[in-house]
Image (cartoon, rainbow, N blue to C red):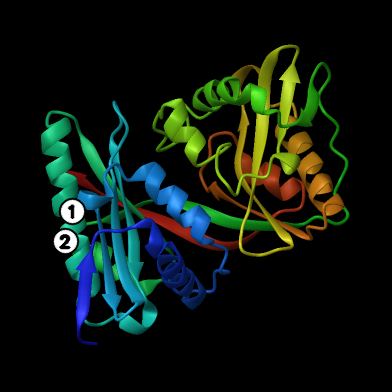
């Protein structure tokens, strides 16, 4: 492949980058669920400066590779290396070149902002993507965590009533800031969590163009948020993606997560959605995998997070 051009990401590249990322997923058996809106919002929400922290590689007008460096928020520790190489463009050194650049840029950000803090670079890949796993290993990355892609039918949802004293209702935009606080608290003990300010968090959650407020629910204990389940539209018209499920500590181990999930599945069915999808930390301390399985979810694929330190 010749006549390649590389430049920083622009929002007008979202369609072409999305096509490439969906092709990478399809090559390892993952469904093509990404939309241009979702991709652009994710990049804008996680990459501080696309001018310095992104690279997109073109062959004519087609994106054949892309790399993004997501710096951690203040007080954070994890640099997310995002991107990949289109399956048909592999074997030419594009992956090596991009990953080497991402690591250099991550180290520059580390030195400039928090040289005394211990930072790590993380990259998520499908476990079946042997090429990507081997490339990461070549650069000193090791697998540190696994996650499951899970899916469920919205038909024949089991009964799971709300625990006593709790009310499950659909999302109300007036609760956005309270929900942000509840989410940061609920996920504070989850592996890899980083505290993000409201504006950054909301841009890829309740403020996203793909956020589906009609299928998202919040569990209330009086005026306190006890838990929440936030849903998003993806590229599959009859599917809903469940992006966040959280229960604050005082209300855990009471069946609240299951009650919220069954409510969402029923709402989704009423809206004409036949399936629901989510991903979950395989080693979640809250036992999330078992909860999801009890309400009808099953594992379809495994995602591996690979990590190496930045020094």
Residue 119 in percent (x, y) is at: 22, 38
Please report the residue visible at 22 percent of the width from the left and 82 percent of the height from the top: 92
User: The C terminus lies in which quarter of the figure?
Assistant: top left
Residue 289 in percent (x, y) is at: 62, 46
Q: Is residue 242 above or below residue 285?
A: below
Please tell me the numbered disc located at residue 192: none
Choose top left, top right, bottom left or bottom right for residue 4: bottom left
Left or right side of 35 for 48: left
Q: What element carries label 1?
A: helix
**Residue 252 visible in this rendered orientation of the protein:** no
Query: What is the CA distance from the residue labelled 1 to the residue labelled 2?
Result: 5 Å
User: The N terminus lies in which quarter of the figure?
Assistant: bottom left
Residue at far top of view: 222
Choose top left, top right, bottom left or bottom right for residue 117: top left
Residue marked by disc 1: 103
Callout 1 touching callout 2 (CB < 8 Å): yes
Residue 45 in percent (x, y) is at: 40, 42
175 and 60: which is toward the camera? 60
Residue marked by disc 2: 100
Q: In this view, does 219 lie above or below 264?
A: above
Please report the residue visible at 34 percent of the width from the left and 61 percent of the height from the top: 83
Residue at far front of view: 12
153 and 130: which is toward the camera? 153
**Residue 301 visible in this rendered orientation of the protein:** yes
Left or right side of 176 for 75: left
Binning the other alpha carbons within 10 Å of mark 1 as few (below 14), some (14 to 19) or many (20 upward) gives some
195 and 295: which is toward the camera? 195
156 and 179: which is toward the camera? 179
Choose top left, top right, bottom left or bottom right for residue 86: bottom left
Please report the residue visible at 21 percent of the width from the left and 69 percent of the height from the top: 6
Binning the other alpha carbons within 10 Å of mark 2 as few (below 14), some (14 to 19) or many (20 upward) gives few
């Amino acid at each position: 492949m010749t006549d390649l051009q590389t430049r920083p990401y622009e929002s007008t590249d979202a369609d072409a980058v999305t096509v490439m990322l969906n092709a990478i997923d399809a090559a390892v058996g993952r469904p093509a669920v990404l939309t241009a809106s979702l991709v652009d919002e994710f990049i804008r929400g996680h990459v501080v400066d696309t001018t310095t922290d992104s690279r997109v590689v073109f062959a004519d007008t087609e994106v054949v590779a892309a790399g993004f460096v997501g710096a951690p928020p203040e007080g954070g520790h994890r640099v997310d290396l995002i991107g990949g190489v289109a399956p048909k463009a592999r074997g030419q050194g594009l992956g090596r070149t991009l990953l080497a650049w991402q690591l250099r840029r991550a180290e520059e950000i580390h030195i400039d902002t928090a040289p005394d803090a211990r930072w790590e670079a993380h990259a998520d890949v499908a476990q079946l993507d042997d090429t990507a796993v081997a490339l990461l290993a070549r650069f000193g990355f090791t697998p540190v965590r696994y996650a499951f892609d899970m899916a469920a039918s919205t038909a024949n949802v089991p009964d799971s009533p709300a625990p006593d004293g709790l009310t499950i209702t659909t999302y109300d935009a007036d609760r956005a800031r309270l929900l942000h606080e509840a989410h940061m608290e609920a996920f504070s003990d989850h592996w890899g969590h980083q505290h993000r300010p409201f504006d950054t968090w909301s841009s890829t959650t309740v403020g996203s163009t793909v956020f589906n407020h009609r299928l998202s629910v919040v569990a209330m204990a009086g005026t306190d948020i006890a838990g929440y389940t936030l849903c998003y539209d993806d590229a599959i018209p009859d599917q809903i993606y469940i992006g966040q499920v959280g229960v604050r500590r005082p209300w855990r181990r009471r069946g609240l997560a299951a009650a919220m999930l069954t409510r969402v599945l029923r709402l989704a069915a009423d809206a004409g959605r036949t399936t629901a999808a989510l991903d979950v930390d395989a080693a979640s301390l809250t036992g999330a995998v078992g909860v999801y399985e009890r309400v009808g979810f099953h594992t379809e694929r495994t995602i591996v997070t690979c990590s190496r330190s930045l020094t």
